[in-house]
Amino acid sequence: MRRTGTTRRSALTATGAFALGAVLTGCGDGPEGASASGGTDARAASLRAGKALRAAAARDSAALLARYDQVATAHPVAEAGIAPMRETVREHLKALGGAARASAASPAPTAPASDPRAALRELAGEERRVADGRAAALLTADPELARLLASVAAAGAAHAYLLTELAKETAA
């Protein structure tokens, strides 16, 4: 009886062919006819865009951290539940190159709702908005910054979910 399906030899051959194709594709020296100064200008523009993107992400994290601080101050009942997420946002701010206490430099967000559940839902919405913005920024970021933004966006999406669940469990 003949064996059907993928064999080890065919899998290794396909993997080798794929790897060789990837290596050969990456060996080009850029667009044909590109001058050396054009490449330098493009690189400088790319670096400036990356710095601007990183600075914008840091500002978003600073504003988000300020929002966490406001909710924790206004609603002590929610402080224990949001403390780990607030600390994570602080670490994201550091990773993005922002100051650990940049909340004074960021614009003051609106006051949280008087109801702790509503304040947590608003905070979840803010996390979701920031995470969506970071996910959209992945398209223009350089690979290193894109990995960082993807990780921070994923954490923000998880925070949004956790905050929504915390709002359901919190007493009014």
Image (cartoon, rainbow, N blue to C red):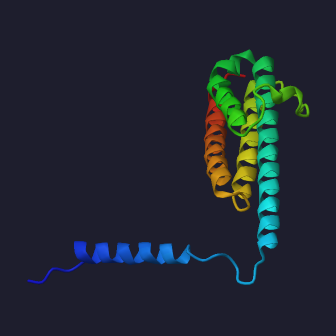
Which x, y percent locates residue 72? 75, 21
Count of numbered labels shown in the rendering: 0
> Residue at coordinates 60% horizontally, 77% vertically from top-left?
28
Question: Which of the two residues, 99 or 158, is positioned nearer the viewer here?
Answer: 99
Snapshot quadrant of residue 106: top right
> Residue at coordinates 74% horizontally, 56% vertically from top-left?
137
Q: Is residue 79 visible?
A: yes
Which x, y percent locates residue 76? 73, 16
Snapshot quadrant of residue 112: top right
Which x, y percent locates residue 25? 54, 77
Question: Which of the two residues, 95 or 159, is positioned nearer the viewer here?
Answer: 95
**Residue at the limit of the structure toward the top, as seen here:** 76
Question: Which of the two residues, 156 or 90, is positioned nearer the viewer here?
Answer: 90
Quadrant location of the N terminus in the rendered image: bottom left
Q: Is residue 112 visible?
A: no
Quadrant location of the C terminus in the rendered image: top right
> Residue at coordinates 36% horizontally, 74% vertically from top-left?
16
Q: Is residue 39 above or below residue 135?
A: below
> Residue at coordinates 78% horizontally, 40% vertically from top-left?
58
Which x, y percent locates residue 131? 70, 47
Q: Is residue 95 above or below residue 19?
A: above
**Residue at the limit of the structure toward the left, as seen here:** 1
Image side of residue 53 versus residue 78, left or right: right
Q: Is residue 137 above or below residue 73?
A: below
Image side of residue 57 versus residue 28, left or right: right
